Amino acid sequence: MDTEIVASESMTINEVQLLLAEERTSLALMRTGIAVLALPLSVFSLLIATSKYYDPSNVLHLLIPLGFLCLALLVSGIYLVFHSLARIRRITRLIHQIKLEHSTLSKYLDPS
């Protein structure tokens, strides 16, 4: 009987470790999304800072594709951030559910 309890607790700890590893992966994905979001902002700030050195009508054939590329980067960055936030919330709910089901392990986990 004791070996079953120990095996069950061990399995539960492994499940929580797996969920925490997935949460770390989601946090890395969020960090990547934030970096992707920062890239178009830095490109546009560079364009604004150097705008006195060029005439926008002369380089419109370059600015339009650059604008579409920055828009695509913004959309993908927003998607990455919100997707990772949704995954983190789901993982947090699963960990909370495990804490409620296994009261003996709740003393090892965060009380929140």
Image (cartoon, helix red, strand yellow):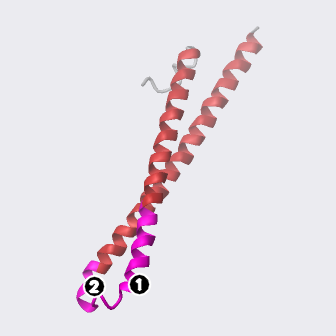
Looking at numbered disc 2 in the image, what kind of residue is underneath it?
Thr
Report x, y in % for residue 59. Answer: 35, 88
The residue beneath circle 2 is 50
Q: How crowded is mark 1: few (under 14 residues within 10 Å), some or many (20 or more)?
A: few
Looking at the image, residue 68 lies above or below residue 75 = below
Per the image, label 2 sits on a secondary structure element best described as loop
Please state which of residues 49 and 5 is positioned toward the viewer in this rendering.
Answer: 49
> Is residue 108 covered in magenta?
no
Q: Looking at the image, which residue is at 46% across and 43% down?
A: 85
Looking at numbered disc 1 in the image, what kind of residue is underneath it?
Leu
Per the image, label 1 sits on a secondary structure element best described as helix
Q: Looking at the image, which residue is at 73% across and 20% down?
A: 7
The residue beneath circle 1 is 62
Please state which of residues 28 and 44 is positioned toward the viewer in this rendering.
Answer: 44
Predominant secondary structure in magenta? helix
Please state which of residues 56 and 95 is positioned toward the viewer in this rendering.
Answer: 56
Which region shows up in magenta? 48-74
Please state which of residues 2 and 11 is positioned toward the viewer in this rendering.
Answer: 11
Q: Quadrant of residue 65?
A: bottom left
Q: In which quarter of the image is the C terminus?
A: top left
Q: In which quarter of the image is residue 62?
A: bottom left
Report x, y in % for residue 78. Answer: 43, 54
